[in-house]
Image (tube, rainbow, N blue to C red):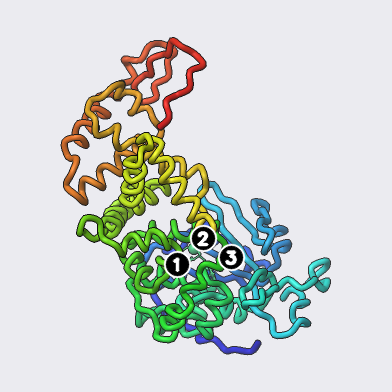
Amino acid sequence: MNIQPVIIPRAEHPISRSLVSPNALRVLYRLKDNGYTAYLVGGCVRDLLLGREPKDFDIATDATPNQVKRIFRNCRLVGRRFRLAHIHFQDEILEVATFRALAPDSPEDELESPPSAEGEESRPRPPRHLVSDEGMVLRDNVFGTPAEDALRRDFTVNALAYSVADFSIIDYVGGVEDLRRGVIRTIGDPAVRFTEDPVRMIRAVRFAALLGFTMEDATWRALLELAPSITRAAAPRLYEEVLKLFLCGEGERVYQLMRQTGLFGHLFPRFSAWLDRETDGFPHSQIGKALEWVDGQVGSGEPVSPPLLLTLMFGEFLEERAEELASGGMPPQESMNAAVAEFLGELAPLVSVPNRVGVVVRDILAMQSRLRKIPGKRPQGVLARTCFADAMAYLRCRCAVTGEGEKVLAWWERYARESVMPPVEAGVGEETTGQPRKRRRRRRGKKPAAS
Ligand code: ATP
Ligand code: MG
């Protein structure tokens, strides 16, 4: 492939080495000193150019994974689908990937040897690039040139590289211009790129919302057209993507875009149908407000756990469903269990929420009725539950959104504060967990109450 990139020299861009992780610089220099090409690539270059703090610093090189391993003692090779080198530092793991190519044009291309071929790595390899009947890429592990590596990426703004050889930015796809204009544009034909990997549609939404960018026309049209195909992506991957989407700090904006594009309805059909209906003449607007609350937490550096996020998003629906089941005669705790199990079970073929997360969602919701009783029986037992903090956060958000439950919330907050035992009061040899001691149970072998 012979595409000439636009090179933006150091004097014409704002990325200074002081903004780059010192470990990343070390790795880049070491690769360069060993005769390899090495770039910072992907999201970190985009973020540095926008004046945002990158989440991580990814490196791409023409050294093969084995060659990288030979240079760095603190290196481990990972990944079965494509081999990556992880360079371990005390407080950071850096990912070093060999330049890769996407769809090769002919089967011969699939036998391509690595760019800096040597020894065992120059042997022809079996095809590593598979495409499903519907055009979805199933495996892509073909070494490529820097140009190919840029072109296989999803969006122009994610395909920029920063070189330590001369501190320039290398742009094969017009990414710098799109960054300047605030545009999310797929590299190549958007319909083809979204078909190869439907998750790119969700990524387009995430970056548009997070960066406050607009979508380029053709990208937007293809997204609207292909939104139903999001269900072809693997359900466990979609779960991970959904978390990234709604925890990115702009979850409310993400939500609006997901609804507008139809992606939300395809991922959460039953919940969406419920959102479109009203309950007692009121529209269901809590999810938007809950996501604003989540954005506030993320913005102030307060982590929101995956089960808490899911409970905040779907809690109103689940509580209503549990009430429905209870009014049909099911015991209250059982009805919440059933409502959550039914919802997550139906969702599993689309977005598969791990069981351990589902259990906490149920516990957070089940605890709400207990929290409403103050002080109730054995409040210290409530405090000792592992989901107490998330259950309180759920209550806090509900209170902020609806104005209900202020008194209850204040009581539990005070109770939790006052129940923390200072270490001096603890007996010799006792652990101080920061939580009140549980009363020892007399009877053994009795099952704990279901919650
Ligand atoms: P974030 O700040 O959320 O980490 P990012 O751009 O770094 O954003 P990653 O998921 O970490 O996103 O991926 C790193 C890079 O890999 C992207 O910038 C993009 O160039 C490329 N990439 C990731 N996922 C895809 C995909 N599905 N298709 C094509 N390229 C992708
Ligand atoms: Mg990243």
Q: Is residue 55 visible?
A: yes
Q: Secondary structure at mark 3?
A: helix
Does residue 92 appear left or right of residue 255 in this picture? right
Q: Secondary structure at mark 1?
A: helix
Give the distance between the C-alpha atoms of the residues marked 2 and 3, in whole angstroms: 44 Å
On the image, the x and y values in percent for residue 411 come to 20, 31
In the image, the residue with mark 1 has its CB under 8 Å from the nearest atom of ligand 1: no
Indicate whether 297 appears above or below 95: above
The residue to which callout 1 is attached is 266
Mark closest to the chain's N terminus, 1 or 2: 1
| Image marks 1 and 2: residues in contact by CB distance under 8 Å | yes
Q: Residue at x 46, y 11 (%)?
A: 443
Camera-side mark, 2 or 3: 2
Mark closest to the chain's N terminus, 3 or 1: 3
Q: Is residue 48 visible?
A: no
The residue to which callout 3 is attached is 29
In the image, the residue with mark 2 has its CB under 8 Å from the nearest atom of ligand 1: no
Q: Secondary structure at mark 2?
A: loop
Rendered image quadrant of residue 35: bottom right
Does residue 385 appear left or right of residue 85 in this picture? left
The residue to which callout 2 is attached is 350
Residue type pointed to by label 1: His
Rendered image quadrant of residue 39: bottom right
Q: Residue at x 27, y 29 (%)?
A: 416
